Image (cartoon, grey):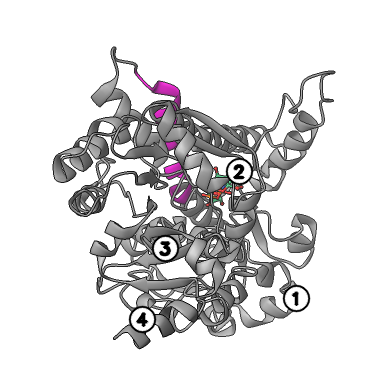
Amino acid sequence: MLRVELINFYIPRPLVNVMAEKVAVIGMGYVGIPIAALLADTGDFEVIGIQRRSKRSEWKIDYLNEGKCPIKNEPDLPELIKRIVLEKKTFSVSDDISAVSAMDYILIDVQTPTNENNVPQYVSLREVSHQVGENLSKGVTVIIESTCAPGTTDYIVKPILEKASGLECGKDFFLAFAYERVMVGRLLYNILNYARIVGGVGKESAAKATLMYEKVLKSEIIQTTAMTAEVAKVVENTYRDVNVAFANEVALVSESLGVDVHEVRLLVNNLPFLKGRGNPHRNMHVPGAGVGGHCLVKDPWLLKYGLNKYGKRPVDLRVIESSRYRNSNMPKYVYQLLTECLHQANKKISDSLKIAVLGVAYIEDSDDPRNTPTRDIIQQLKKNNINFMVHDSFVRQGEVNFPFTNDLNSVIADSDAILVITAHQEYKDLNLHSIKTLMKESPIIIDGRVTFPPEIVVETGFIYRAIGRGQFIPE
Ligand code: SAJ
C-alpha cells in the first residue's frame, strides 16, 4: 500500500492540471462550445462541457469527446477543439450534471427561446438552475451567459439556486449574468474581442466572475449589476431590430417614390462624423427580405416580458413592437413583389408555376437556419398553391421542417421566378445569362437582399424587383 501511494506521489501530473481551476459549461451549443474551448485552451482551466442526452443534441457528446467540432463553418474552432481534447486533454463532455459539484465556476449556456406568444420559455434554465443548486458547493461562481429577460437572474435563477442548495447568494456562492455576444461565423472572434459585460448579483459576484474572464478574454471587462446587464443585452439587439425596421420602412417609401433605397442609404450614412462624437450619427441599416436568427427576433420580446413582470410602471413599447411587426412582415412583402412580377409576365398564379427559393440560412454564408424568413415565404407560396423548390448549400438536412436541396441547378431549372432570400456568395457568383437559359420564358428575379447588380439583371432580360429599388417599378 505504502509503495503504491509513494509511486502516485512521485509521478508528477502535468502542473497545468494540478493548478487549473475547474469550469463546467452547461449547454454545448453556439454559446457554450466556443467559450468552453477558449477557457480550456488557456491552460488555466480544466473544462467539462455538460450536455443532456436530448434527441437533437446528444450526438454532440461523443462527437466533441472525439475532438470533433459540431458547428460547421466556424473559423479556427475545429482546430481548437481538436487541440484541447486530443493534445492538451483539458476539455471533455459529459451528460452528468452532478459533475458541477467539483467546480470553481459553472457557466449556464442553455437555450432561452420564446414561444409563439413571445413569452420566454425557461424550462431548460429552471431545470438546470435547480440541478446546479442541488450540486452547488460553497465558493462557486455561477455565471449565466444565455440571453435572459431583465429580472431573470435576480428573481428566477437566484431563488432556485438558494432553495436547492440551502446556500446564500453573495455569501456562500456567487452569481453573475455575463451575456454572450456571439455571431455565427465569428464565434471565437466575438468572444475574444467584444467587451464582456459582467452583471453581478452584488459587487462581489461581478468581481468573482471577472477573475475567470480576465484569464481568457483580450477585451475589456465591464462590471455592473445583473439587471443592468440583462437590459443592455436585450436592448443591444432591440436597437438593431428597430434600425432594420427603419431601413425596411424607408425601402417601402423609396419604392413608392421611385428611388433606390440603397442610394438613399449611402447619402444618409455619408454625413460626416461630428467632431468628438465616436460613432457616426447616421447609420441606416440595410433593408431585406426579413430578420432571422436567434437574437433580433427574440430579444425585443424578452425586454417586454421583463418590463411587464418586474417593471415598476407600465411602458407601451410602440416603437419597439411596431418595428418587430415591420420586420416580420417583410417576407409577405417579398411575396407581394412576386405577384406583381407574375402579373407583369402575364403568368397566372397556379400550380403550374415553379418558384426557385434561394437561401434557407438566416444570414449569408452561414449554416444557421434559425427563424429564417424563408419559412414565412414558403408559407405564402403554399397558401396560394404555388409550386416551389428551395435551395441552400450550407444548412444541414433536417434542420428545418421543409424540404430543400443543395442542387442549385435543379431548383432553378424550369422555374418561372427566382426569389433570393439569403445573400450567399454562390448566388452572387451566378451567371445571369446562364440561369436565364435554364428558366422558363419571361423569367423573374426578386432580390430580397443585395445580391445582383440591378442593371445587369434588367439588361439580361429578367423581370426584376428588389426591396427598396423603386426605380424598377413599372409606371
Ligand atoms: N438584417 C437585415 N438588415 C441589416 C442587418 C441585419 O435585414 O442591416 C437581418 C439579417 O439578414 C438577419 C437578421 O437581420 O436575417 C439578423 O442579422 P444580424 O447581423 O443581426 O445577425 P445576428 O442575429 O447573428 O446578430 C448578432 C447579434 N449579436 C449578438 O447577439 C451578440 C447582433 O447584435 C450583432 O449586431 C450581430 O450579431 C453582429 O453583427 O455581430
Q: Kindly give the residue lying farthest to the front in the view shown.
A: 2
Disc 3 and disc 2 in contact, CB within 8 angstroms:
no
Query: Residue at 26% of width from left, 39% of height from top?
Result: 157
Disc 1 and disc 4 in contact, CB within 8 angstroms:
no
Horizontal and vertical percent position of residue 211: 52, 43
Disc nearest the viewer among 4 and 3: 4
The residue to which callout 2 is attached is: 287
Image quadrant assignment for residue 184: bottom right
Task: Name the amino acid type tagged 2.
Answer: Pro
Disc 4 and disc 3 in contact, CB within 8 angstroms:
no
How far is the residue under mark 1 from the one under mark 2? 27 Å
Query: Residue at 42% of width from left, 73% of height from top?
Result: 92
- Is disc 2 surrounded by few (<14), some (14 to 19) or many (20+) residues within 10 Å? many
Disc nearest the viewer among 1 and 2: 2
The residue to which callout 1 is attached is: 433
How far is the residue under mark 4 from the one under mark 3? 41 Å
- Is disc 4 surrounded by few (<14), some (14 to 19) or many (20+) residues within 10 Å? few
Task: Name the amino acid type tagged 1.
Answer: His
Task: Name the amino acid type tagged 4.
Answer: Glu
Q: Is residue 357 magenta?
A: no
Q: Is residue 330 magenta?
A: yes
Horizontal and vertical percent position of residue 66: 45, 84
The residue to which callout 4 is attached is: 5
